[in-house]
Image (tube, rainbow, N blue to C red):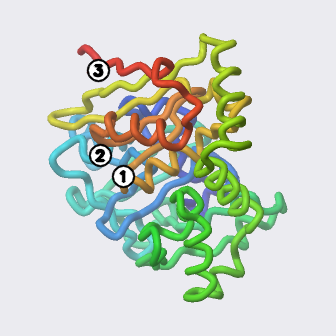
């Protein structure tokens, strides 16, 4: 989300999103900074993966207020935002995001909406992560059109980008080639082939498949410091998240990738899921038992004695 007049974008400023933080601004990084990735949903949430923008009611002085990032759904009602005449407007309080007088690393403020005020004008840009580092990237970025159109797979029923984590990738691929050939042509088939090969290895009984698992189990036993922990953590009234730690310790040996795993959980539970620390994934909701089952199925070489259920976090 960019203010064209200043070249500033909404930014988390690398603050820890496991707690309520003030939303800031920083020079636009042409879509190449995760701290600047936001979305405006059809139901009016200005959000990241698990956090949403909300005006701090206690900070309102006159026509000015602080904007925070808090866990989505933590309160009974999340703030609703609309992009109206180029302004990002909070429908509940009739305040708009404004960069007047702001510079890098300052906190964004919300002020009374004023027509044709350049510091309140915003545009939603297409995420350009992975594109060339040309200086003209920002100027050439494509505005996103809403509502977003999402294609779902007829086999696993998930969005197409999650098919490679479905456990039935080869069937999804065949369905996609037959029913959505234009989307099939866009795929990075190299990544999908790796998923299919991994699934076939897990499906084998005896022979080389069992040998691979046995070798991995033997490697784990040599390094007993490896351990996965799961814990349920309260977030507000009657809200919980599930925190998974330790999977990264298996990454170098068994190719356990935290970002792909967070994406797998997000698709499986249809909820927010993100990597929040070097070796930590936070999933919205009380899904600890289900994640235990997924770990046992997807990574059978992680023995049950290497997985610890820490229960509920004490307040």
Q: Which residue is mark 2?
A: 55
Q: Is residue 297 left or right of residue 180?
A: left
Q: Nearer the viewer, mark 1 or mark 2?
A: 1
The secondary structure type at the circle numbered 2 is strand
Report the disc number at residue 311.
Answer: 3
Q: Say which residue appears at 58% left-offset and 51% top-offset.
A: 203
- Residue occupying the point 66% across, 38% down: 210
> Mark 1 — residue?
269
Is residue 150 visible to the viewer in this orientation of the structure?
no
Left or right of 82: which side holds 62?
Answer: left
Q: Position of residue 146 (x, y in %)?
A: 44, 77
- In the rendered image of this protein, does residue 190 appear above or below residue 111? below
- The Cα–Cα distance between marks 1 and 2, rounded to whole angstroms, is 28 Å
Comparing labels 3 and 2, the label whose residue is closer to the camera: 3
The quadrant in which residue 288 appears is top left
Secondary structure, mark 1, is helix
* Chain-order first, disc 3 or disc 2: 2
Where residue 121 appears, as percent x and y from the top left, is 49, 66
From the viewer's perspective, is 54 left or right of 21?
A: left
Q: Earlier in the sequence, mark 3 or mark 1?
A: 1
Point 67% across, 71% down: residue: 141
Please, what secondary structure does the residue beneath circle 3 have?
strand
Whether residue 128 appears in this view of the structure is yes
């Amino acid at each position: 989300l960019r203010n064209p007049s200043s070249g500033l974008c909404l930014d988390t400023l690398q603050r820890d999103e496991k707690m309520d933080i003030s939303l800031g601004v920083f020079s636009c990084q042409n879509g190449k900074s995760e701290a600047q990735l936001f979305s405006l949903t059809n139901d009016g949430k200005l959000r990241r993966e698990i956090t949403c923008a909300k005006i701090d009611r206690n900070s309102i002085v006159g026509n000015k207020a602080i904007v925070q990032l808090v866990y989505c759904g933590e309160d009974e009602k999340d703030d609703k935002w609309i992009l109206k005449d180029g302004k990002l407007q909070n429908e509940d309080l009739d305040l708009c995001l404004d960069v007047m007088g702001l510079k890098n690393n300052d906190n964004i403020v919300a002020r009374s909406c004023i027509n044709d005020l350049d510091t309140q004008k915003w545009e939603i840009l297409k995420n350009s992560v992975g594109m060339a580092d040309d200086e003209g990237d920002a100027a050439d970025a494509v505005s996103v059109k809403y509502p977003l159109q999402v294609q779902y797979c007829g086999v696993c029923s998930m969005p197409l980008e999650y098919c490679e984590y479905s456990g039935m990738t080869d069937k999804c691929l065949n369905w996609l080639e037959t029913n959505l050939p234009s989307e099939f042509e866009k795929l990075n088939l190299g990544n999908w082939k790796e998923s299919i090969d991994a699934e076939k290895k897990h499906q084998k009984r005896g022979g080389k498949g069992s040998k691979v698992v046995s070798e991995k189990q033997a490697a784990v036993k040599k390094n007993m410091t490896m351990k996965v922990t799961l814990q349920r953590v309260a977030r507000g009234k009657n809200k919980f998240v599930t925190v998974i730690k330790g999977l990264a310790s298996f990454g170098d040996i068994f190719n356990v990738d935290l970002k792909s795993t967070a994406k797998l959980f997000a698709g499986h539970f249809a909820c927010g899921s993100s990597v929040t620390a070097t070796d930590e994934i936070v999933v919205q909701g009380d899904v600890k038992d289900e994640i235990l089952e997924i770990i046992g199925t997807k990574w059978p070489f992680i023995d049950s004695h290497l997985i610890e259920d820490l229960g509920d976090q004490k307040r």
